[in-house]
Amino acid sequence: MTKTTGLSTGATNGTPPAVSFTGAVKTYGAVRAVDGVDLEIASGETVALLGRNGAGKSTAISLLLGLNEPDEGAVRLFGTTPQHAVLAGKVGTMLQEARAVTRVTVRELVAFVAGRYPDPMPLARALELAGIADLAGRRVDRLSGGQTQRVRFAMALAGNPSLLVLDEPTAALDVEARHAFWHSMRTYAGLGHTLLFSTHYLEEADAYADRIVVIDHGRIVADGTGEQLRRAAGGNLVSFDLAGRGAEGLDLLPGVRSVEVRGDRAVLRTDDSDATVISLARQNAIRGLEVAPASMDDAFLALTAPETTKKMTETV
């Protein structure tokens, strides 16, 4: 699928974008984990990064944080190198892989991290935003998985960074904690900060991101709002009973992007559901008809499907 146009214009009024990838490439042997990525995120934007496991998300984040250098192209944060931006305290990170520190309290740990930054957030505010003010005196190694995740969030906030990078931030949280987390994120973003987060919860990306960037095989395959991505993938799903007939020719119907057969039902992804249904009616082929908008799950699967299968019938 052709890459959609991003919403961000990057620099405004001469101010460099918060994040800029220009032709970035990172290879590991024969694998191009990041393959010519061009991306700009303006200051103040909240952007979700989506992709399957192995799509290149983690490598892209490692380049953004200066943990790796691109083999080709460039990555800049606020107009400077990632390393300089991190040393200047402009970047806060919350990564999935982290071990609990033993024999220290939540307050001690977050205060230690804050002390490494030139202009840290007040400790009480960081604990409050992370929803762990009541855990301040608890030892970090005696917390639950969800509580530990919120401590990581407080550590990411501690330096009061301009750019916050979050890798699967709600992975260990229950529903209530996830809602509280995103309330905190909206509060933080409302202060003009830039947020970039990766997630496997597609509904979170749809609900909380200004833009959604989908990466697959190291390349950006879509960049836009949730609504734009759903339209790009085929705005509606038309399904009906095949009643013993085959699926041949369904991909040629007006508006149809792809066809999938699930048992004895055909599911058509279409840009024009009215035209598709009218054509089906003329063929007397609409038993058990249902028309529904495509979900973010549907859009993601369509956008990351191999090019050779997007217009082919697939029997499940």
Image (cartoon, grey):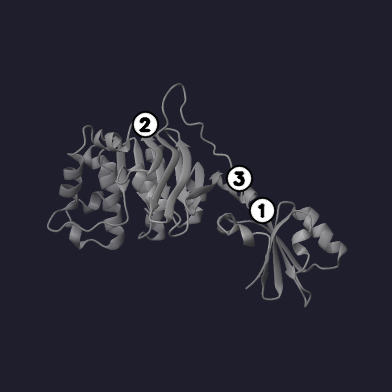
Mark 3 Cα shell of 10 Å, populated few (<14), some (14-19), many (≥20): some
* Residue 251, x across and y down, in percent: 74, 61
* Residue linked to disc 2: 78
Q: Residue at x 46, y 36 (%)?
A: 40
Vertical side of 15 occupied by 163: above or below: below
Q: Residue furthest bottom?
A: 244
What secondary structure is found at the residue carrying circle 1?
Answer: loop
Mark 1 Cα shell of 10 Å, populated few (<14), some (14-19), many (≥20): many
Image position of 231 (left or right of 128): right
Q: Is residue 181 visible?
A: no
Vertical side of 6 occupied by 99: above or below: below
Q: Is residue 153 visible?
A: yes
* Residue 37, x across and y down, in percent: 47, 43
* Residue linked to disc 1: 234
Q: Amino acid at mark 3?
A: Gln
Q: Residue at x 60, y 45 (%)?
A: 228
Query: Could you give the CA–CA distance between mark 1 and mark 2, rounded to whole angstroms?
Result: 36 Å
Figure quadrant of the C terminus: bottom right
On the image, which quarter does residue 6 sit in? top right
Q: Amino acid at mark 2?
A: Phe
* Residue 81, x across and y down, in percent: 32, 34
